Image (spheres, coloured by chain):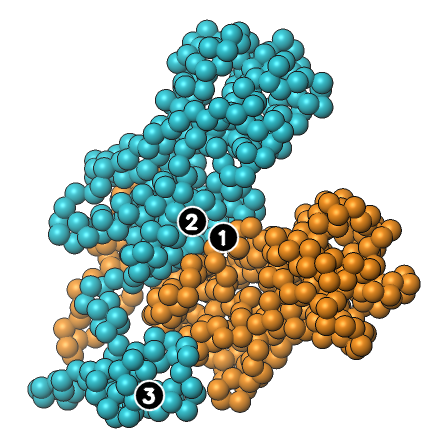
Chain colours: A cyan, B orange
């Protein structure tokens, strides 16, 4: 489209109708071609494209995004290597929830993969480059560079899981969505006590993640006098749960219950207990966390666990961010954190 | 940074050194703050940020991307719903290969999730919005709108898997990376013939994907006279393989071998064969395709299969695209397609 010469009035913006008239086709055909061209015969599509070029037509959505400076896209950053993202169903469920909500709001999900710590510089550049309107970040660790990156990019962000800090640089609350990790852990341990178990061990997650420390706190709320040997640290993976279980059996051979901080670690622990001849739940009662699909239902025996709605949390994160973007344009405050409830699901393992 | 008034000479661009001097810190500290701020104490980082603002410093990478008009990012589009992407290890392996290569080239992987056909309009807008330098697209179906989208966005693109068309709108070859699907299928069926099997069935993939039709063609190359009842159509999922196996057993109860067009379908077929009392490989020899990890190794018995290097193909796609971007700037032609070899891996199922 030729630029108007200085001082001249800009020509009126050409309409979809004008393109349709020039190409000799219907409005619907123009719209289809402009939006990707699926289902339109090639010669027809060519005619429409020529008319678009001749008239300098700019589709409405592009015009809209020029006005609002919105890309119509949201970046999703998971602070874990891509191998874990694809092997732990927790992440796919959270992404599913985010994807459903963003799709319902006609917003593009842009997943930014992190392969290692060296990638953060590049991700920071992308976030600062105006390619997304906001960000969703989850599975953060205490010293994660992501909060600094999104702050520097001045990008509205909602976190999945309570961040290790409580207020932004400007003193504002940091918006996040999290499950009631501490309350859920308390319910699990109280349930084991109610079954008459007296030596209840805990397999915890990585201590640099609040979901792990909150669940450990819930365990300690109920058992403030539990010996330190009853607590072993894992890394939220099946293999780390198995290794932690082996250490616990060596240190406390008389344990009669285990509360694992997630289902994958519970599943790893279950394999070790069976291999060592301990029957579950008769000798050792076992409770997990997450009620993750399909793991919790398909172990043998299936897992008693603390359910959190992972997909729902993803949906909430996306909703909170989009609402926050709208409010921000009106000068409103950042959204408040949301804590979702947990429920104990009883199956055969305890 | 104040804009220079018309006619005045623009001020020299402030350097990293100038920022370091003004803030009273080292060059390394400035660089760390500019690139995300990890590992720099807050008061120091604040001083650097003030100096950056005072001087109107533009970091080098931003300046570089202004000159080259490169975002340093590549979009990856998988033409499958997000549920399949996270459940079929084929996709995670391809993404792993892409991610490794892009990371090695300091390029950001941007995964654009597709939830349904209604999402393509939005993806087209994102691709046309200048947020990525090129695209990698795989698992395309015959009538996929993705080729039209990337063409409209004038975005250099490499396809994973041979597209259903052979030349771009301009008559140029379409760059893609694919395995030798037809040759691999021929090797599998010849191997079954060599074992003395006479009634060899085929479970094919969706007929709108070239990987499926090429493997079916390989089967027919070796068995041009096979009855149509010996061929059942699946959808590359485990469940569809099981259903296809059930149909085959009804139609051809005397079959003594099955070549499935991927390992997931072979695994589904294996479950049905065992449930119907057919021993594998004694009654029915079974061969898959892909040698996908961990499926092919962990079925009981493990699968004889046609190996393709899925991760390597992802790496090649990324390499081809980045090389193509460099060449394109120099006015060179688009890269040529690459066909990677396949090998038969013998395990207990045949």
Residue neighbourhood size for the residue with mark 3, other residues' Cα within 10 Å, grouped as few (<14), some (14–19), many (≥20): many
Kindly report the distance in space between the C-alpha atoms of the residues bearing marks 2 and 3: 37 Å
Q: Say left or right for B71 vs B242.
A: left
Q: Position of residue B118 (x, y in %)?
A: 37, 65
Q: Which mark is residue B92?
A: none
Residue under the image location 57 percent in, 22 percent down: A349
Dot 3 falls on a residue whose secondary structure is helix
Q: Specify the quadrant that holds the N terminus of chain B.
A: bottom left
Q: Are marks 1 and 2 in contact (CB under 8 Å)?
A: yes
Dot 2 falls on a residue whose secondary structure is helix
Residue under the image location 17 percent in, 75 percent down: B8
Q: Nearer the viewer, residue B217 or B202?
A: B202
Residue neighbourhood size for the residue with mark 2, other residues' Cα within 10 Å, grouped as few (<14), some (14–19), many (≥20): many
Dot 1 falls on a residue whose secondary structure is helix
Q: Specify the quadrant that holds the C terminus of chain B.
A: bottom right
Q: Are marks 1 and 2 on the same chain?
A: no
Q: Are marks 3 and 1 on the same chain?
A: no
Kindly report the distance in space between the C-alpha atoms of the residues bearing marks 3 and 1: 36 Å
From the viewer's perspective, is residue A170 above or below residue A13? above
Res. B194 visible in picture: yes
Instruction: Identify residue for label 3.
Output: A48
Q: Quadrant of residue B66?
A: bottom left
Q: Which mark is residue A96?
A: 2
Q: Position of residue A314 (x, y in %)?
A: 37, 44
Res. B265 visible in picture: no
Q: Which mark is residue B83?
A: 1
Q: Position of residue A49 (x, y in %)?
A: 34, 87
Kindly report the distance in space between the C-alpha atoms of the residues bearing marks 1 and 2: 8 Å
- How many discs appear? 3
Residue neighbourhood size for the residue with mark 1, other residues' Cα within 10 Å, grouped as few (<14), some (14–19), many (≥20): some
């Amino acid at each position: 489209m030729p630029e108007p010469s200085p001082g001249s009035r800009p020509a009126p913006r050409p309409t979809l109708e004008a393109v349709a008239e020039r190409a000799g086709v219907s409005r619907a055909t123009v719209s289809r071609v402009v939006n990707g061209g699926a289902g339109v015969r090639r010669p027809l599509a060519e005619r429409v494209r020529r008319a678009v070029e001749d008239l300098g037509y700019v589709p409405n959505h592009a015009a809209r995004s020029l006005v609002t400076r919105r890309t119509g896209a949201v970046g999703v950053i998971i602070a874990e290597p891509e191998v874990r993202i694809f092997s732990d169903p927790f992440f796919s469920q959270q992404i599913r929830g985010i994807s459903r909500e963003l799709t319902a709001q006609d917003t593009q999900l842009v997943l930014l993969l992190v392969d290692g710590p060296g990638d953060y510089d590049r991700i920071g550049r992308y976030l600062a480059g105006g390619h997304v309107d906001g960000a969703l970040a989850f599975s953060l660790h205490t010293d994660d560079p992501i909060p600094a990156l999104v702050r520097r990019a001045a990008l509205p962000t909602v976190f999945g899981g309570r961040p290790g800090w409580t207020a932004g640089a400007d003193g504002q609350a940091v918006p996040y969505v999290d499950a009631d990790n501490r309350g859920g852990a308390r319910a699990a341990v109280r349930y084991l006590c109610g079954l008459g178990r007296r030596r209840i061990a805990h397999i915890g997650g990585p201590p640099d993640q609040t979901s792990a420390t909150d669940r450990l706190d819930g365990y300690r709320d109920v058992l403030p006098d539990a010996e330190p040997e009853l607590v072993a640290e894992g890394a939220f993976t099946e293999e780390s749960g198995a290794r932690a279980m082996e250490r616990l059996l060596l240190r406390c051979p008389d344990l009669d219950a285990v509360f694992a901080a997630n289902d994958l670690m519970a599943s790893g622990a279950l394999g070790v207990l069976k291999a060592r001849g301990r029957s579950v739940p008769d000798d050792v009662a076992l409770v997990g966390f997450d009620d993750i699909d399909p793991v919790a239902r398909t172990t043998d025996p299936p897992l008693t666990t603390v359910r959190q709605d992972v997909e729902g949390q993803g949906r909430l994160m996306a909703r909170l961010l989009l609402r926050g973007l709208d409010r921000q344009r009106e000068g409103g405050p950042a959204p408040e954190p949301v804590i979702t409830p947990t429920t104990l699901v009883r199956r055969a393992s305890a």
